[in-house]
Image (cartoon, rainbow, N blue to C red):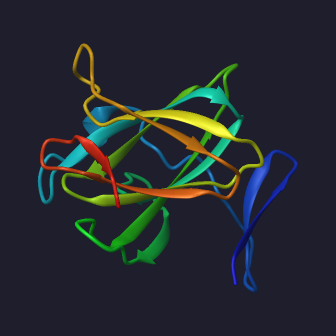
């Protein structure tokens, strides 16, 4: 059994084994996303209200060692999610946005592991002047699943 516990401003994964500190497992620049085998979308997750936000995103590519997540099997057109977790800590006073790499056509899961309701704006077409985005409200412990199509547009899994 795994649970998350927030103590002294650090997020820790608790299990019967040793404790592992989660760090931000995101990218600094879109150039860090793979362009082939398979190609990935560079996605921006922005906190627009509420928070601070503590988010886990399952289904990402990471350039640094990460924690495995999944498997989540979903109905409909969304594929199974089993990959790596990216942890994002966002707040309205300093770090409002984080970047993650998501596979083109891949499904991902976002869960709010914090204690505050958060309002997020997410786009996977950040190089455009006026990129399309989705707005997501997440209550504490709430999760949502989305898929990025072949052109990095986002749609909810239904």
Farthest residue to the top: give it.
129
Farthest residue to the right: give it.
8
Image spot of residue 38 (x, y percent): 15, 58
Count of marks, rendered view = 0
Left/right of residue 142 with respect to residue 41 in the rendered view: right
Image spot of residue 126 (x, y percent): 29, 26
Left/right of residue 117 with respect to residue 29 in the rendered view: right
Image spot of residue 153 (x, y percent): 23, 40
Image quadrant of residue 80?
bottom left
Residue visible at 35% across and 61% down in the picture: 158
Asked if 28 appears above or below 35 in the picture, the reply is above
Which one is nearer the viewer's eye here, 18 or 60?
60
Q: Quadrant of the N terminus?
A: bottom right
Residue visible at 30% across and 34% down in the picture: 30
Left/right of residue 148 with respect to residue 17 in the rendered view: left
Residue visible at 39% across and 53% down in the picture: 62
Image spot of residue 133 (x, y percent): 34, 31
Asked if 54 appears above or below 15 in the picture, the reply is above
Which one is nearer the viewer's eye here, 126 or 7?
126
Residue visible at 67% across and 55% down in the picture: 113
Farthest residue to the front: give it.
158
């Amino acid at each position: 059994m795994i649970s998350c516990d927030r103590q002294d401003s650090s997020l820790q994964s608790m299990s019967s084994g040793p404790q592992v500190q989660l760090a931000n497992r995101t990218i600094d620049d879109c150039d860090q996303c793979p362009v082939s085998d398979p190609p990935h979308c560079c996605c921006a997750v922005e906190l627009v209200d509420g928070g601070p936000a503590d988010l886990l995103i399952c289904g990402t590519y990471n350039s640094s060692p990460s924690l495995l997540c999944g498997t989540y099997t979903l109905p409909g057109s969304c594929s199974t999610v089993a990959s790596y977790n990216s942890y994002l800590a966002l707040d309205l006073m300093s770090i409002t946005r984080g970047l993650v790499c998501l596979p083109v056509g891949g499904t991902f899961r976002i869960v709010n592991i914090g204690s505050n309701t958060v309002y997020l704006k997410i786009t996977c077409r950040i190089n455009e002047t006026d990129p399309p985005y989705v707005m997501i409200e997440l209550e504490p412990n709430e999760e949502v699943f989305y898929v990025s199509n072949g052109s990095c547009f986002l749609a909810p899994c239904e």
